[in-house]
């Protein structure tokens, strides 16, 4: 039950954070009402650095969240540590419960009185050990998955930061005079200006 709650909470948290921080508002309220923000100057973009994604991924592999700091996405650092912390917490909790039932099982086999005497049968003690062992393994996998997602996020974010998102797109009519046949060819071209 705890693992299902953990997974649902994690999914809700990631979905909420993605929706909240996914898009910045491009409209500004000014004296004349609601207007669009001016487009950034193409000179504001940093030159392309092919090693930036690899650096960001390496930094996140060394210390989770360091790649996000390298990219300037400081708000993602608490999300990474919260995910890792939750996974470690559930591992420790399941490990304690596993040890508790394991000790009771050993005590019962040795003929000593355990804390579950008269309440839980020997077969149920074995089932409880298997349940908590499986939950420990799942906690390890979830923690490793969040660690890997942290590295992938830093790499992808570094790639996307270098992508020119200028809204300076234009359609221009194009007329081409063919000197061989004497005919004019008409067309429409999409021009991307960098």
Image: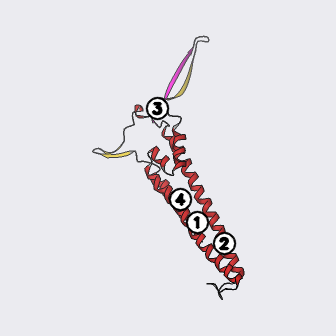
As for residue 181 lying within the magenta part, the answer is: yes
Residue at 54 percent of width and 66 percent of height: 89
Mark 2–mark 1 CB contact (< 8 Å): no
Q: Is residue 123 visible?
A: yes
What span is colored magenta in the figure?
164-184
Q: Which residue is mark 1?
A: 91
First in sequence, mark 3 or 1: give its number.
3
| SS at badge 1 | helix
Q: What's the distance in space between the residues labelled 2 and 1, CA to CA?
A: 13 Å
Q: Which residue is mark 3?
A: 47
Q: What's the distance in space between the residues labelled 2 and 3, CA to CA?
A: 53 Å
Residue 133 numbered tag:
none
Q: What's the distance in space between the residues labelled 2 and 4, CA to CA?
A: 22 Å
Residue at 47 percent of width and 52 percent of height: 76
Looking at the picture, how far across and down is residue 129, in whole percent? 67, 74
Residue 84 numbered tag:
4
133 vs 31, left or right, is right
Asked if residue 12 is positioned above or below residue 1 in the image, the reply reads above
Mark 2–mark 4 CB contact (< 8 Å): no
Which residue is nearer to you in this view: 32 or 148?
Answer: 148
| SS at badge 3 | loop
Crowdedness near tag 4: few (<14), some (14–19) or many (≥20) residues, C-alpha within 10 Å: many
Looking at the picture, how far across and down is residue 130, in whole percent? 68, 72
Q: Which residue is mark 2?
A: 131
Crowdedness near tag 1: few (<14), some (14–19) or many (≥20) residues, C-alpha within 10 Å: many
């Amino acid at each position: 039950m705890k693992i299902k709650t953990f997974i649902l909470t994690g999914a809700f948290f990631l979905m909420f954070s993605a929706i909240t921080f996914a898009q910045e508002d491009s409209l500004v309220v000014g004296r004349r009402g609601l207007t669009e923000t001016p487009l950034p100057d193409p000179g504001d973009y940093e030159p392309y650095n092919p090693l930036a994604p690899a650096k960001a991924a390496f930094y996140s592999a060394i210390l989770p969240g360091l790649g996000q700091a390298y990219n300037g996405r400081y708000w993602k650092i608490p999300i990474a540590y919260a995910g890792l912390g939750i996974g470690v917490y559930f591992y420790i909790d399941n490990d304690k419960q596993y040890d508790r039932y394991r000790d009771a099982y050993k005590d019962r086999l040795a003929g000593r009185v355990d804390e579950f005497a008269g309440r839980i049968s020997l077969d149920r003690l074995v089932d409880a050990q298997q349940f908590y062992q499986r939950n420990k393994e799942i906690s390890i996998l979830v923690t490793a998955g969040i660690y890997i997602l942290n590295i992938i996020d830093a790499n992808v974010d570094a790639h996307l930061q270098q992508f020119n998102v200028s809204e300076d797109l234009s359609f221009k009519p194009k007329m081409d005079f063919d000197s061989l046949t004497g005919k004019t060819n008409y067309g429409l071209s999409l021009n991307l200006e960098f």
